[in-house]
Amino acid sequence: MFIQPYEGYNPVQLPYYALLNSLREGGYILYARHGEANVGEDQPDLIFQDCSTQRNLSDLGRRQAIIYGETIRRLHIPFTRPVLVSPFCRTRETAEWAFGAWNIQVDPFWIEIYNLNNNLNTVEQTRTLNDLNSILEIQPPPGSNRIIIAHGFPENVGLGPIPDMGTIILKPLGQGNGYEVIGLLSLMELMSIFR
């Protein structure tokens, strides 16, 4: 079984066992979209500390988050703490269910990724994507991976659409050198690596 490449790139196709071995050696970013969030809706006057003003995780979304964290641990994939998350309740809650509240750090930059789904002008979109590229070029500490839990992207923008609790695996090449998109794993595909 091979990892699914994101269609907007020409990533390396790896069999799951080779991917797992690479992840265990470290040096990757696991960019995950939050779990299913279909409870409520994002209000125009959204307040990040007030979950009643935004779309939240469903029961399924909470279960997805728990399974995600358990799968990362069962696969013995090392990761740097804290896990970086967007300030939205659904991303914070996903990370808390997966890795524990003490292992997360809210980073307001990820609001910009959420905003890509709104009608940004070209200048704002380009600035956000340039900032994203700079972040994704940063290599994690040796022997570890970085986990980011944030939002999906519009079609043909950034990393593209990501399913609920899907993960895009990236290989940072260092500041100014870009990154390689290895591929996209759904939660079910991530779980199947273990089998």
Image (tube, rainbow, N blue to C red):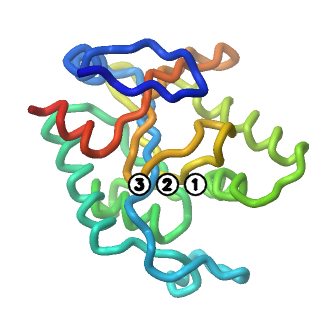
Residue 118, percent from left and from top: 75, 60
Which tag is nearer the camera, tag 3 or tag 2? 3
Tell me the residue that label 3 is attached to: 164
Please give the name of the residue rendered at 27% of the width and 32% of the height, measured from the top-left corner.
Answer: 78
Residue 23, percent from left and from top: 30, 23
Closest to the observer: 61 or 104?
61
**Is 72 left or right of 141, judged from the image as shown?**
left
Q: Which mark is residue 156?
A: none
Badge 3 density bin: few <14, some 14–19, many ≥20, Cα 10 Å? some
Q: Is residue 96 above or below residue 194?
A: below
Q: Amino acid at mark 3?
A: Asp
Tell me the residue that label 1 is attached to: 107
Residue 48, percent from left and from top: 59, 75
Please give the name of the residue rendered at 52% of the width and 87% of the height, measured from the top-left corner.
Answer: 52
Query: Quick one: quadrant of the N terminus?
Result: top left
Q: Quadrant of residue 20?
A: top left
Sequence-first tag of 3 and 1:
1
**Is 49 left or right of 72, judged from the image as shown?**
right
